[in-house]
Amino acid sequence: MNLQTFRRGKITLAMALCAAACSQLSLAQGTSHSILQIDLANYVLYAGDTSDPSKFATDPNVTTPSPARNFSKNIHLADVVAVNGQQVKGNFASAQVLVALRTAPTPGQAIADSYRNNISTVTLEILKGDGTPIGTIIASGLVSGPPPPGSPVPVSTILQGGHNLAITGGTGAFLGVRGQLGAAPPVARTASNTEDPANRRRHGGGAGTWRWTAHLIPMAAPQVVTGASGPAVFHSDFSPVTAARPARPGEVLIVQATGLGPTVPSVDPGHPFPTDAILPVNSPVAVTVNGQDAEVVNAIGWPGLVDTYRVDLRVPSGLVAGTASVQLSAAWIAGNAVRIPVQ
């Protein structure tokens, strides 16, 4: 089954019937935390070693910057190439000011109560492989020095590389996120700000990739709608999955969910999805059943409902009879798991 084979009229009617059956269901509660490991390539730090604007980005050759002085500004550019091991596209851009905070400064450094090097603002724009935007994560803070207290593994390990940034928000799939962002020691090439960044990929950055880790607390996480009768998980005929009629390996189930984010095309916030069109979810959607990856057949906005979605998934083989946990994620942000009976 796929979106191209759906008969729109029958699907709209079936969805309406299921929506009526599920009208008393409510969202499972709980705060979701997700870890995104974001890999960058072709990373170049353009040092602010000249203040003459006529020379900015003019040299087509590989350059070597002059030694940085305190209070100088620099720009960092790189390509986003993967998130949690999934290949993507995207842009990394960071503006930094060298402040050289030191508890025992040498001349030219700044006296302070902790060791930090830069004030930094970071923007991570993540795209699908075809260049469609998924969303942007924005963070700011201080660079270098110890990680923040209480940061979870692997974030605490990653932040030892010297990045202590607060995630201040985002757009698209990451609308309203908060959290913290860090990175391992940098894999970068340092250039002068006179070097033409049009040649960044051709000249290359540091060797390999540089991994950033985002600890995200989203404004809304994907959730299976749940009520007194249990999770809103249905067989293909829209009858509920129950102990008397459990899910079967290989079967395609219908899940009613919330929090999957924008669709293509999008609808205005607070408005229902149209009843005369099928709108696919824009973000990558994934489902696990007892920790196994399940095939996502489709993920669409539920016609006539607000922030409610239909996800069709194929139950993986090899499950042990009993109960199984089902967990949704969208844009690598995971929701709370629910449990369903399986045979």
Image: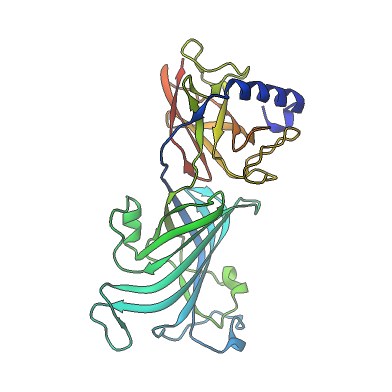
Q: Which residue is drawn at 29% across and 64% down?
A: 146
Q: Between residues 310 and 53, which one lies in front from this camera angle?
A: 310
Q: How is the image coloured?
A: rainbow
Instruction: Specify whether residue 307 is in view.
Output: yes
Q: Is residue 283 above or below residue 275?
A: below
Which residue is found at the position 62% from the left and 25% from the top? 19
Residue 320 seen in the figure: no
Q: Relative to residue 65, is residue 306 depicted above or below?
A: above
Residue projecting furthest to the left? 104
Name the spot of residue 22 as percent of width and height, x first.
57, 23
Q: Where is residue 150 in the image (x, y as percent from the top left)?
A: 29, 53
Residue 273 placement: quadrant: top right
Q: Where is residue 309 in the image (x, y as percent from the top left)?
A: 60, 34
Question: Residue 85, image x and y in percent?
Answer: 48, 48
Q: Quadrant of the N terminus?
A: top right
Please indicate whether residue 299 sits to the left or right of residue 42 in the image.
right
**Is 200 placed above or below 238 here?**
below
In front of the other: 161 or 302: 302
Quadrant hosting residue 184? bottom left
Q: Is residue 138 toward the left or the right of residue 20 in the image?
A: left
Q: How many labels does the image show?
A: 0
Q: From what the image shows, is residue 111 above or below residue 218?
A: below
